[in-house]
Structures are given as structure tokens and as C-alpha cells.
Image (spheres, rainbow, N blue to C red):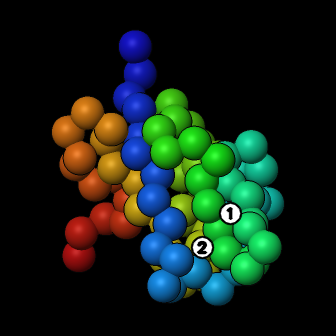
Amino acid sequence: MGDRWHVEVDRSVCIGSGMCVNHAPGSFRLDTARQSRPTEPDVDANEQVLAAAEGCPVEAITLALADTGEVVFPPED
């Protein structure tokens, strides 16, 4: 079985660009305040969700392994 990711959006950082929705429309949505929310907190690891996190202009999306909490994105500097 593949990895599962826990997806979080830092709403204090999110600017509502919608890039995450463009990259992974089934995994993110914009709420009435035009802020991103994951549609599910835990998802199967996949390229679309990773592309959404990488494409976020303000790096508001964090991906972590659901079972260990180890951060997958953003990479540590």
C-alpha cells in the first residue's frame, strides 16, 4: 500500500490564488472567504496534490506522512 499524506493549508498565509484547485481540483476547494481547504484531511500520495503544494505562490500547503507526521513538503532548508 502507498503512502498517505495529511494535507494542511495555513489559512493565515493563503491568499486564495486558486492554484491548488487548478492543480488538484478534487483535493482542494476555495471557501466563501476565497481561502483554500483540503477536501479530505488525509489523501493517498499523488502527483496532483504535490503539484498543488509546489505551485502555491505563498507555500501555504503542508504535506506530511499521515502515519508518522514526517513533513514531505515543503522540504526543510
Point out which mark residue 75 bears: none
Residue labelled with disc 1: 20
Q: Which residue is label 2 attached to?
A: 56
Residue 45 placement (x, y as % from top left): 48, 36
Identify the amino acid type marked 2: Cys
- Describe the element under mark 2 as helix, strand or loop: loop
Three-letter code, disc 1 = Cys
Quarter of the rendering containing residue 22: bottom right
The spot of residue 1 in percent (x, y) is 40, 13
Q: Is residue 67 above or below residue 63?
A: above
- Secondary structure state at the residue bearing disc 1: helix
Residue located at (24% from left, 69% from top): 76
Q: Is residue 54 left or right of residue 39?
A: left
Count of numbered circles on the image: 2
Q: Quadrant of the C terminus?
A: bottom left
What residue sits 41% from the left and 22% below the top? 2
Q: From the viewer's perspective, is residue 76 above or below residue 21?
A: below
Q: Is residue 15 left or right of residue 42?
A: right
Whether residue 27 is visible, yes or no, is yes
* Residue located 41% across and 41% down the image: 5
Decide: few, some or many residues near mark 1? Use Cα within 10 Å; few <14, some 14-19, many ≥20. Answer: many
Q: Residues within 10 Å of mark 2 (few under 14, many from 20)?
A: some
* Earlier residue among tags 1 and 2: 1
